[in-house]
Amino acid sequence: QVQLVESGGGLVQTGGSLRLSCAAAGSSSSFNVMGWYRQAPGKQRDMVATITTSGITQYANSVKGRFTISTDNAKNTVYLQMNSLKPEDTAVYYCNGGIIRPGRRTDYWGRGTQVTVSS
């Protein structure tokens, strides 16, 4: 059984930085892609950044140039470095691990960590 545990959220002022971590336990080596998603109150959960096992990254337009996703394979951990934070970045951030097989994708989610950016 795979577990994803996020950490690193908190309260920060506009322009500040935070680094989120997601530690994967269990059969995490099966993931083809890992990423971060966020959900603000009353809104849908949206992709923030993803990274594949080959290191290909993808970012939401709203975070390009400010956020960086990376992995430490030895630690089975994925990180999200967030710089120049804005109030609109306030949300619960969820770690995601995806296992992709022909015609099917299985997703695993962490419980989320709150990020609040004050103006």
Image (cartoon, rainbow, N blue to C red):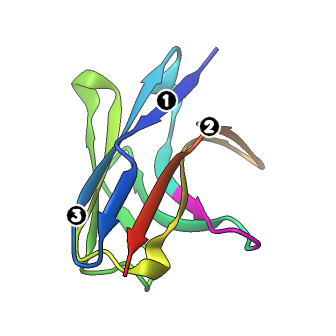
Q: Amino acid at mark 3?
A: Ser
Q: Is residue 88 above or below residue 30?
A: below
Q: Amino acid at mark 1?
A: Val
Q: Earlier in the sequence, mark 1 or mark 2?
A: 1
Circle 1 is placed at which residue position? Answer: 5
Q: Is residue 101 above or below residue 16?
A: above
Circle 3 is placed at which residue position? Answer: 17
Q: Tell me if I can see residue 107 in this picture.
A: yes
Circle 2 is placed at which residue position? Answer: 111
Q: Amino acid at mark 2?
A: Arg
Disc 1 to disc 2: CB gap under 8 Å: yes
The quarter of the displayed image where residue 16 is located: bottom left
Which element type, helix, strand or loop, lies under badge 1?
strand
Give the side of residue 75 with respect to residue 60, left or right.
left
**What are the residue bounds of the magenta stretch?**
37-42
Residue 38 drawn in magenta: yes
Q: Position of residue 115 (x, y in %)?
A: 45, 58
Residue at x-position 38% and y-position 73%: 118
Position of the C terminus, as image quadrant, is bottom left
